[in-house]
Amino acid sequence: MDLGELLGCVSSASCVMAQTTNGLIVGMLLFLVASGLSLIFGVLKVINFTHGSLYMMGAFASLYVYRLTDNYFYAVIGGTAAIALFGVLLERLFISRVYKSDILMQLLVCYAWILILDDFVTIVFGAEFQSLGMPETFAVPPVFVFDTPVPPFYIFLITISFAVAVGVWLFMEKSAFGRKVRAAAANSSMTSVLGINTTALYAIVFAVGAALAGFAGALAAPVRSLTSGMGFSILIESFIVTVIGGLGSIIGALVAGILIGLVRSFGSVGFPLFVDGLVFLMMAVVLVIWPNGLFGKRGT
């Protein structure tokens, strides 16, 4: 523990800028994964424990496409689309069969797929760490903010993630399909009575949630070491984001993701051995004051 180091960082504009940038990167990746997780649970009422593995698969799928095309934007699009398609197949063939089962059965099915996907990645890509590396498009001099070098890719990652956040919110709140999704989340039996095709709705919702996780993995690929099992830690923190932000709230997931990212970033300066503890402490404090999360609705 080094409180003096933290105070020194806070008093330095360059250190604040560097840690804020790092925190936003972590926070936006957490938001993308957590928003998909929250969307799936809100509508399908299934705790998708494989969601972290979908993030991992998105990273490796983008790595595979990048090696084929040497184009990062193709890699992001291809990786995201592949995980969305895989999400539809996973939901239709396996997840849909445990909708009405107890949580233990849902956990077993999801855990089986965690093991399958981890082994698949190990077989195809090997057990050693993989790296996509910085795409050539972004291999340019950094932008200096408060005398702090900020890589252009970091700016791209943060900006595109914010754009997706706005897009998801508009999709859920303003579109006709978004209203159907919210209706299904509020009362799934009523949607069938109203003539809404719940089978197609559930498949699309799962695909969107999976795509968000895959997109996060594709964005993380240039700045993270890729290995099987990399989805576990972000899965845990995505649950924390959902709890802090409030179930079903896109804005809540965004705010909570950024908060956790900043706590991790600045906490690593002064409390490097207690960073995880700080995150869980923040969750505990939020739940004491706001039992439904920062933006959660009563009864969720």
Image: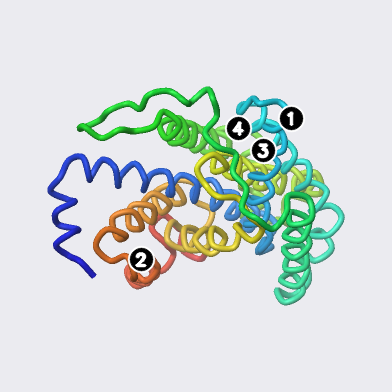
Q: Quadrant of residue 132?
A: top right
Q: From the top left corner, tell me how far across and down residue 197 is, in percent.
A: 81, 44
Q: From the top left corner, tell me how far across and down residue 251 is, in percent.
A: 44, 46
| Residue carrying label 4 | 175
| Residue carrying label 2 | 275
Q: Quadrant of residue 144?
A: top left
Q: Amino acid at mark 1?
A: Leu
Q: Is residue 270 left or right of residue 279?
A: left
Q: CA distance from mark 3 to mark 1?
A: 10 Å
Q: Is residue 6 left or right of residue 267?
A: left
Mark 3 or mark 2, which is nearer the start of the sequence? 3
Mark 1 or mark 4, which is nearer the start of the sequence? 1
Q: CA distance from mark 4 to mark 1?
A: 36 Å
Q: Are marks 1 and 2 in contact (CB under 8 Å)?
A: no
Answer whether residue 287 is visible to the viewer in this image: yes
Dot 3 falls on a residue whose secondary structure is helix
Mark 4 or mark 3, which is nearer the start of the sequence? 3
| Residue carrying label 1 | 68
Dot 2 falls on a residue whose secondary structure is helix
Q: Are marks 4 and 2 in contact (CB under 8 Å)?
A: no
Q: Residues within 10 Å of mark 4 (few under 14, many from 20)?
A: few
Residue located at (35% from left, 53% from top): 259
Q: CA distance from mark 4 to mark 2?
A: 39 Å
Q: Quadrant of residue 281?
A: bottom left
Q: CA distance from mark 3 to mark 4?
A: 29 Å
